[in-house]
Image (spheres, rainbow, N blue to C red):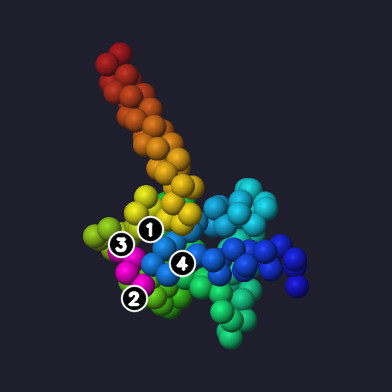
Amino acid sequence: MNPFYHRIYRVVRHIPKGRVATYGIIARLAGRPGAARTVGWALSALPEDNDVPWWRVINAAGRISFSGQDHSAVLQRALLLREGVRFAPGGGGAVNLGTYGWPSEAYDSAVASHKRAASTRRSRRLKGLRT
């Protein structure tokens, strides 16, 4: 098996119960920043009988990556809820990475960066309306 997959599995095993990590953070912690898709491939390659808590890995938007009707999405959501992870209200509710993200310091900077980017986009839209 791919040695990088083993590193991914080792990192995912460290995510505490009741916390989540994004594919990108797992890739970075496993030594390959930018390899988020590979993390997804590695998790999808897991055998049935494994001890890797794959359900604790979500996308950068704080959402489950499977489509809402997929059995895996239903299972992942149920497993996270059972561990105490809460989703924002609504059908496509996201997990608050600032609250549930692991390691928390990785999401402190990501949340701040996301807020700055949203503020910049909002400013550009408003500027376009003013001219």
Instruction: Residue 87: give its label.
Output: 3
The tag earlier along the polypeptide, 2 or 1, is: 2
Question: Residue at left 34%, top 76%?
Answer: 82
The tag earlier along the polypeptide, 1 or 3, is: 3
Report if residue 85 lies within the magenta region. Answer: yes
Label 1 to label 4, Cα distance in Å? Answer: 10 Å
Say which quadrant the C terminus sits in.
top left
Task: Give the residues in magenta.
Answer: 83-87
Q: Nearer the viewer, mark 2 or mark 3?
A: 2
The tag earlier along the polypeptide, 4 or 2, is: 4
* Residue kind at label 1, given as amino acid type: Tyr
Q: Secondary structure at mark 4?
A: loop
Instruction: Residue 82: give its label.
Output: 2
* Residue kind at label 4, given as amino acid type: Pro
Label 2 to label 3, Cα distance in Å? Answer: 12 Å
Whether tag 4 and tag 3 are in contact, CB under 8 A, the answer is: no
x and y percentages locating residue 6 in the rendered image: 69, 68
For disc 4, the marked residue is 16
The tag earlier along the polypeptide, 1 or 4, is: 4
Q: Secondary structure at mark 1?
A: helix
x and y percentages locating residue 51 in the rendered image: 56, 79
Query: Which picture quadrant has residue 83?
Result: bottom left
Q: Nearer the viewer, mark 4 or mark 3?
A: 4
Query: Which picture quadrant has residue 12?
Result: bottom right
